[in-house]
Image (tube, rainbow, N blue to C red):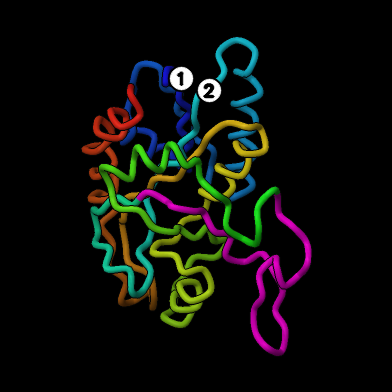
Amino acid sequence: MTDLLIVTAVDAEARAVGPHDDVRTVVSGAGRTNAAAATTEQILLCRDRAPFDAVLSIGVAGALPGSDLRIGDIIVASSCIYAEEGIVTSRGFAGMDGLGFPLGDFEGNAVPVDEDLLDRLGAAFPIGPVATVATCSGTDAAAQTIARRTGAVAEAMEGAAVVHAARRLRVPAIEIRAISNTTGDRKNQRWDLEAGLSAIEKNMARILDCLGL
């Protein structure tokens, strides 16, 4: 690989990624709309003069119940799962399969990541599903609901949108997260944002080495 696009939500994550040869880092802003728009914009802007070989969504995330993830751990998404898209009925929540409309050229709510990127990065880091949420889990019930609904080990706010946008434009993509906090009741959450950002910084060389950069 020679040209890589990295999408972060905020400046602090971009600083943790740092400058690297053959890597373009863009700060999208928080949330799915910002992430999808920024990813699409960058791919289209650079397509004619220097197309990207891959896109990475990189940032911090919250560990979901039952994941055994600790603050400072790195997780590579085996899939990126939209947590809210679907329908709520008297029988509970059903994803896009239950609603009967596709989100893309994949089934249900799980955006597939690129298999080659997953193989490369999965050889060096743990993998697992990561949920993309619009509303973060600030109660135990909310965190348990997201974990049960998606099967994810962590939640963040941009990954599925970045990977989905890149997929639509036929660019391989994947999500990588560093755990900065737990989820659940806000008063009991454990936070160490600096540890999460430090984990990104410390592991960037290894990430890029996996990708041949």
Dividing the picture into quadrants, the one containing residue 206 is top left
Q: Secondary structure at mark 1?
A: loop
- Span of residues in magenta: 76-104
Q: Residue furthest bottom?
A: 90
- Residue 48 percent across, percent down from the top left: 65, 13
In-front residue for pair 116/18: 116
Please tell me which residue is depicted at 63% across the width and 32% down the height of the picture.
Answer: 170
Contact (Cβ within 8 Å) of mark 2 with mark 1:
yes
Dividing the picture into quadrants, the one containing residue 147 is bottom left
Q: Is residue 143 above or below residue 167?
A: below
- Residue 85 percent across, percent down from the top left: 66, 64
In-front residue for pair 19/211: 211
Q: CA distance from mark 2 to mark 1?
A: 5 Å
Q: Secondary structure at mark 2?
A: loop
Please tell me which residue is depicted at 24% across the width and 38% down the height of the picture.
Answer: 203
Left/right of residue 119 with respect to residue 159 in the rendered view: left
Name the residue that disc number 2 marks. Answer: 52
Label 1 environment density (alpha carbons within 10 Å; few <14, some 14–19, many ≥20): some
Name the residue that disc number 1 marks. Answer: 3
Disc with the residue nearer the chain's start (2 vs 1): 1
Q: Is residue 74 above or below residue 18?
A: below
Indicate whether residue 143 is drawn in magenta: no
Disc assigned to residue 187: none
- Residue 49 percent across, percent down from the top left: 60, 10
In-front residue for pair 185/133: 133
Label 2 environment density (alpha carbons within 10 Å; few <14, some 14–19, many ≥20): many
Please tell me which residue is depicted at 48% across the width and 28% down the height of the picture.
Answer: 5
Which quadrant of the rendered structure holds the N terminus? top left
Please tell me which residue is depicted at 29% across the width and 52% down the height of the picture.
Answer: 126
Indicate whether residue 78 is drawn in magenta: yes
Question: Mark 1: which amino acid?
Answer: Asp
